[in-house]
Amino acid sequence: MSIHFHPTNPTIEDDHDANLPSSDEDEDETWDDWISDSSTQRGDCRSLFDNKTGNVEDIIAYDKAAHGFDLNEACARLSLDVHGRIRLINFIRQTKPAPANIASLTGKESFFTSDDFLRPVVEDDPMLRYQPDDWTDSEDEDSLSTDRRIRLLEQKLTETKRDFQEYRKIVNQRFNLGQTAEPSGLPPKRDDDSHYFESYGANDIHAVMIQDKVRTSTYARYILGTPSVFENAIVLDVGCGTGILSLFAARAGARKVFAVDASDIAMKAEKIVKANDLDSVITVIRGKVEDIQLPEGVKVDVIISEWMGYALLYESMLDSVLVARDRFLKLDGVMAPAHSRMMLGLCDASEIVKDRITFWNDVYGFDMSVMAEEMYHEAVIDVVGSHAMLSTPSVVKELHLSSTTTRQLDFISSFKLTSSVDRRTKVTAFILYFDTFFTASGNPVAPEKEVDVIQENDAVVAEVWPLGGRPAPQRRMSQHHKKEKSVDKSTGDATKTDVVTSFSTGPKSIPTHWKQTLFLLKEPFVVDEGFVVYGHFHCRKSVSNSREIDVEMHYTIQDVEGQNESPEVIVQMFKIQ
């Protein structure tokens, strides 16, 4: 179903990096587990403004000294109660305002009354449970008798318990948190990995990926056509599969390649390496990149990986690639790919609606429409043509692989989609796809850089596939592999000339095995030229399986004169699985 809300003004960062609570930790923790853990003196409280950790009091003092923000003073100045203090902490953690901007808060901002900011941004956040000793009535405690002081403390303890009971009730009701159950024993540890790795042990999935000529030829062109990156380099291939990227790296002159995979395919990759007489260069390591060790603390020059899933982030393989980066990549090393963009647009998916939804309305004279109900809750992975795009796409997430963190993979992003149709057309879906960029420097590309779109007649495979054992033909550099400007990682300036290779999974390109991700609308709407759809795209790991994605679309529609076609915010929720 879709939900309608009256419009509000959510506080969302325009750079798309607003973070939701990570689901990487144990989602089975209940409210009672959380609230009963009062160990605010342990050293895992994180600063409100950076990654410094310590106990709560030390971190509050650190934020005051390092960032000029005193949490206790701000709460006193704004006369915040327990709920207000919790909202302020979660607001800072989620929206990341500059410390100087917090000083201008008056206490009347909308987030101080929003239940959204009662939900912890940092799981098991000690700062939410901490109350300073001087949080008392205005009465001078030094002048009070011992009995009076005890009564005041008992009163405050009762009030605090009541406040937290109210907080518990709000969170349980709003976010459907489970109640504490009487355990009969320790619950089994959830396993999101076994089926995932088992699925990559069979041949078929690797055949599909290698036969995707957009994917494989782009990696080959980058690796074989960028000698400055790969000649004499130490390379780490994360999730190597059959080892195809490692083989390209060895052919490009890499000194050493470590090919890592946790699935059974690693055994076949080792045989493939030996069959091609490259076992002196390529070492296959079976295991999770989070657990393995490289010989003698080796640091690598390049990390290559084909980590992208449906809708870019499905399967959460990027998390492992970022772990590999932080563990093994040299400070000046190169991530390949270097940059990905998640793109959102309006779509006419009427053919898919016909095949997957309206088909069930009449099956040999029987009403089977119940079979289609789940299609409005599950994203559809399919291919549409370029004619199905009804708007210019909007970037809803930029991933700079040299600096992205796992916390940034759960996010809320604003979007504006302007209809590009020349006549009234029904929008039946939002479409999501991604563009990916490789650079010789490892820097992200400049914002104005457009992705290369591979067409059916482009000879991209012939450029990199030697036939009959002969060397690949010497060709002039492809139009898909050329010098562009990239963004210098240290300065942020888009002035550095770089060699950029890229591909798109969008409707204008040859279809890839990623296809496109379609969010079919329960309530389709009609647009004309110039209509604008404003909204927010919510993306986070599923609480039931961290390799799946939960998406929410919040949107309103305006006509060309700026009048709301839908006065309420429409919300529809989807799962990518």
Image (tube, rainbow, N blue to C red):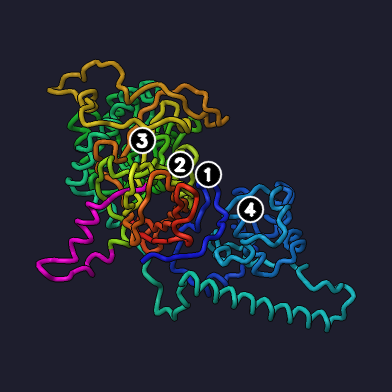
Q: Amino acid at mark 1?
A: Asp
Dot 2 amino acid type: Glu
Horizontal side, residue 30 vs residue 455: left or right: right
Q: Callout 2: 10 Å neighbours few (<14), some, many (20+)?
A: some
Image disc number at residue 15: 1
Q: Nearer the viewer, mark 1 or mark 3?
A: 1
Q: Amino acid at mark 3?
A: Ile
Q: Is residue 491 visible in this depiction of the protein?
A: yes
Q: Is residue 153 above or below residue 261?
A: below
In front of the other: 285 or 504: 504
Q: Residue 254 appears in which quarter of the rendering?
A: top left
Distance between mark 4 and mark 3 Cα atoms: 33 Å
Quarter containing the N terminus: bottom left
Which quarter of the figure has residue 214? Answer: top left
Which residue in the structure is indicated by mark 3?
304
Q: Position of residue 351 (x, y in %)?
A: 22, 51
Q: Which mark is residue 398?
A: 2
What is the distance, in whole Å, between disc 1 and disc 3 at their CAs?
26 Å
